[in-house]
Image: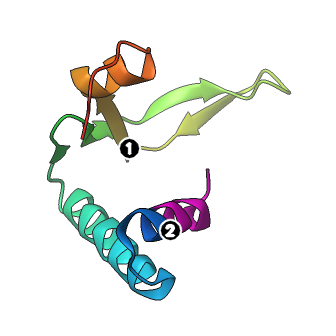
Amino acid sequence: MTKIDIINHVSDDTGLSKARTEEAFDAIIDAVRESLVRGETVILRRFGSFHVRQKNARMGRNPKTGREAPISARRVVSFKAGRNFKGAVNGEGMKFY
C-alpha cells in the first residue's frame, strides 16, 4: 500500500476531499517525524509505538570482500506493534482502532 492508496481509502471512508485528506496525512506524518527527531517516543494506542534507539559505532565486515569496515554510530527508529494490532493482523478479530 502506498501513500496515495491510504489517502484514497481515508478520503472514501470520511468523505473528505483527497486534497484535504493528503494535508491531514502529511500533518500527521510531520508530527511523528518531528517527535522522533527530538528523541521522543510516539505511542499510537492499540496500534503500536515508535522509538528512537542509539546504535554504537562498531566494526563490520564488507560481505563482498570480507574486509573489516567501520560502521558509524547512528540513531535508528524501531516500531513495536501493539497487542490489538498484532491480534488483528493474525486474524484474532481484535479491533485495533
Whether the magenta-drawn stretch holds residue 2 is answered as yes
Dominant SS in magenta? helix
Q: Which residues are magenta?
A: 1-9
Secondary element at tag 1: strand
Seen from the viewer's position, the closer of residues 54 and 49 is: 49
- For the residue carrying disc 2, how many other residues have a C-alpha within 10 Å: few (<14), some (14-19), or many (20+)? many
* Left or right, 22 with reference to 5: left
Quarter of the picture containing the C terminus is top left
Q: Which residue is mark 2?
A: 7
Give yes or no for contact between labels 2 and 1 (Cβ–Cβ under 8 Å): no
Q: Which label sits on residue 14?
A: none
Q: Amino acid at mark 2?
A: Ile
* Left or right, 60 with reference to 81: right
- In the rendered view, tell whether residue 26 sits above or below residue 93: below
* Left or right, 90 with reference to 78: right
At x 34%, y 18%, the residue is 93
User: Where's residue 16, x and y in %?
Assistant: 38, 79
Q: Quadrant of residue 39?
A: bottom left
Seen from the viewer's position, the closer of residues 24 and 77 is: 24
- In the rendered view, tell whether residue 48 sits above or below residue 93: below
- How far, Cα to Cα, is label 2 from label 1? 27 Å
Q: Nearer the viewer, mark 2 or mark 1?
A: 2
* Left or right, 59 with reference to 52: right
Secondary element at tag 2: helix
Q: Which label sits on residue 76?
A: 1
Q: Amino acid at mark 1?
A: Val
At x 46%, y 30%, the residue is 58
Which of disc 1 and disc 2 is earlier in sequence?
2
User: Where's residue 44, x and y in %?
Assistant: 19, 45
* Furthest residue toward right: 64
